Amino acid sequence: MRVGINGRFLVAKRTGVQRAAYNLIKTMVELDRENEYFIFTGMEQIGSPDWNYSNVTVVGDHLRSSESFRNHLWEQFKLPRLAREYKIDILHSPANIAPLFYRGKSIVHIHDLCFVVNPQWYSFSFRTLYNLIIPRIAKRATKVITNSNNSKNDLLQYFGLPAERVSLVYWAVDEIFSETRNSSFYKSQNFSGPADYILYVGSLEPRKNINLLIGAFEELRSQHPELKTKLILIGGESPLFAAVRLKAKRFRDDVIFKGFVKDEELREFYCRAKLVAYPSLYEGFGLPPLEAMASGTPVVTSRTSSIPEVVADAAIMVDPHDSGQLVSAMYKVLTDKELSDSLRRRGLEQVKKFNWYRVARGVLGVYYEVHLRKNSQPLTVHSFMPQSIWAKIRKREAKV
């Protein structure tokens, strides 16, 4: 099987979707020696050790992170020609967007339909474009993969896709966040943050409910003056989202905006935090709570959309519209060591369910299902993966 990978995501800033797509493809090519992979992406990926396998070919082209519109045109018009030129059996687009007019067998990952469910959270241009092309991409794809039951139900409801056309494969957590608090890394002397803080990680956009978090933090400090805890927000704004006016009042000097940070620094912020607060209103999956649990940090989050699927009973879940619940939950975690330790233990157990070998196994099963399907046959949920590959992945998965 000749698998083409839409590698436009590799030249984009690595936020949640791009991070997940990178980890997926990296794990796939690490495990699979039976099939050929062709990664269509930017020139800088040529020679990368991530893709240094005999059955992997990087096809470099003129993609640049600073040229989003040009990259979009490449994806829509040049990528299909490259797929035909390299005689691709399946074209896989793991980061939401795929070529609209590609005629071959294709798989597209659609992470969530937030732009449909809550369009007011996005810029006019973004939601107009996505509402124009994403439904058409989903309906033309041979198979759609999504990462939670919540997102799968949205695809069935809003796009009217048949259930057999949508596969659920949960995402996983990047292994970089699996450092323990007792590691030498955690004892780094170069840490730039305070000693006592609540952490938020994610983009600064309306659905993340950050103003409620800031308000709850200030209420927490007002009600409990003995606390000197600060609030650190890691992430940046994007023109894709509606503007968010973030305001801190009485404790504004204790609300720290860090912007984007490198993975190594982010890992340390997770490890040192007293808790991670993530009161998001809607998530297709929600990586930050999982990253926090992998880092051994207690989580307070929402009981909405896909988040309960991810955290189960390993986090405190609150109504994201109720500031009082958030204040109470954060105070309990900060002051109750027994609760904090229990959440930490449960989080480390919960995160074991989400590893990239399991993700790769699910996606490879979809590859074989699509590849071996005849054009006249309906798609089924049966996995056609050869036992040799299945056994190899299960063996690796068992070691995690």
Image (cartoon, rainbow, N blue to C red):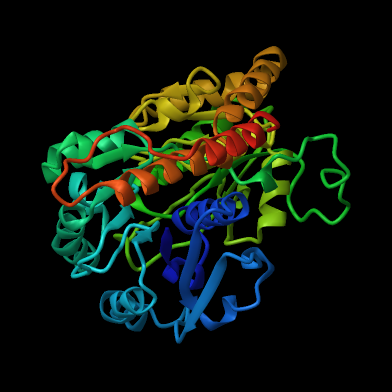
> Would you identify the image quadrant in which residue 95 lies?
bottom left
Q: Name the residue located 13 percent from the left edge and 48 percent from the top edge.
A: 376
Q: Name the residue located 33 percent from the left edge and 57 percent from the top edge.
A: 96
Q: Position of residue 125 (x, y in %)?
A: 21, 69
On screen, residue 53 versus residue 66, left or right, reads: right
On screen, residue 301 versus residue 186, left or right, reads: left
Note whether 370 is above or below 387 in the view shown: below
Q: Name the residue located 61 percent from the left edge and 28 percent from the top edge.
A: 352
Q: Name the residue located 18 percent from the left edge and 49 percent from the top edge.
A: 116
Note whether 101 is above or below 338 in the view shown: below
Q: Nearer the viewer, residue 196 or 347?
A: 347
Note whether 282 is above or below 258 in the view shown: above
Q: Position of residue 272 (x, y in %)?
A: 74, 40
Q: Position of residue 59 (x, y in %)?
A: 49, 78
**Which residue is the extreme one toward the bottom?**
62
> Would you identify the image quadrant in which residue 7 lies?
bottom left
Q: Position of residue 21 (x, y in %)?
A: 48, 55
On screen, residue 132 versus residue 297, left or right, reads: left
> Would you identify the image quadrant in which residue 229 lies?
top right
> What is the count of numbered marks?
0
Note whether 252 is above or below 123 in the view shown: above
Q: Quadrant of the C terminus?
A: top right
Q: Can residue 185 be seen in this view?
A: yes
Q: Can residue 218 be seen in this view?
A: no
